[in-house]
Image (cartoon, grey):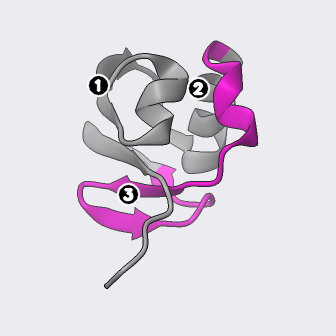
Amino acid sequence: MQLTIKYFGMLAEATAITEEQLHTESCSVSQLLEKLQHQYPKLSDKDFKVAINQQLVNHNHIITTEAEVALLPPFAGG
């Protein structure tokens, strides 16, 4: 399956990109993050949330279809 990975804020700075396409088998969010942290070691020390198709998910969520994955840094409301 193909995933579109979007990076925002400090996460885009850490990866030096804002978006990429990734081909992978079904996996959990945790497994996907392991792959991304291996590819972009600077992500390992960052705090962020993950959204799949614009819905926040936990790290146990299983990605089984093509999806848009957004890595979201902490943000303050006002």
Q: Secondary structure at mark 2?
A: helix
Quadrant location, the C terminus? bottom left
Relative to 13, residue 55 above or below: below
The amino acid type, in three-letter code, at marker 1 is Glu
Q: Residue 39's image quarter?
A: top right
Q: Secondary structure at mark 3?
A: strand
Q: Of the residues tagged 1 and 2, which is closer to the observer? A: 1
Count of marks placed on residues: 3
Q: Is residue 52 part of the magenta span, yes or no?
A: yes
The amino acid type, in three-letter code, at marker 2 is Leu
Q: CA distance from mark 1 to mark 3?
A: 14 Å
Residue 36, which numbered label?
A: 2
Q: Is residue 49 left or right of residue 23?
A: right
Residue bearing the label numbered 3:
51
Relative to 2, residue 54 above or below: below
Q: Residues within 10 Å of mark 2 (few under 14, many from 20)?
A: some
Q: Position of residue 8 (x, y in %)?
A: 36, 41
Relative to 51, residue 33 above or below: above
Q: CA distance from mark 1 to mark 2?
A: 12 Å
Foreground pick, 4 / 44? 44
Q: Position of residue 24 (x, y in %)?
A: 45, 22
Q: Position of residue 60 (x, y in %)?
A: 62, 60
Q: Is residue 7 left or right of residue 11?
A: left
Q: Residue furthest front?
A: 78
The amino acid type, in three-letter code, at marker 3 is Ala
The range drawn in magenta is 39-62
Q: Residue furthest bottom?
A: 78
Residue 40, which numbered label?
A: none
Q: Secondary structure at mark 1?
A: strand
Q: Residues within 10 Å of mark 3 (few under 14, many from 20)?
A: some
Among the two numbered marks 1 and 2 on one chain, the one whose residue lies closer to the N terminus = 1
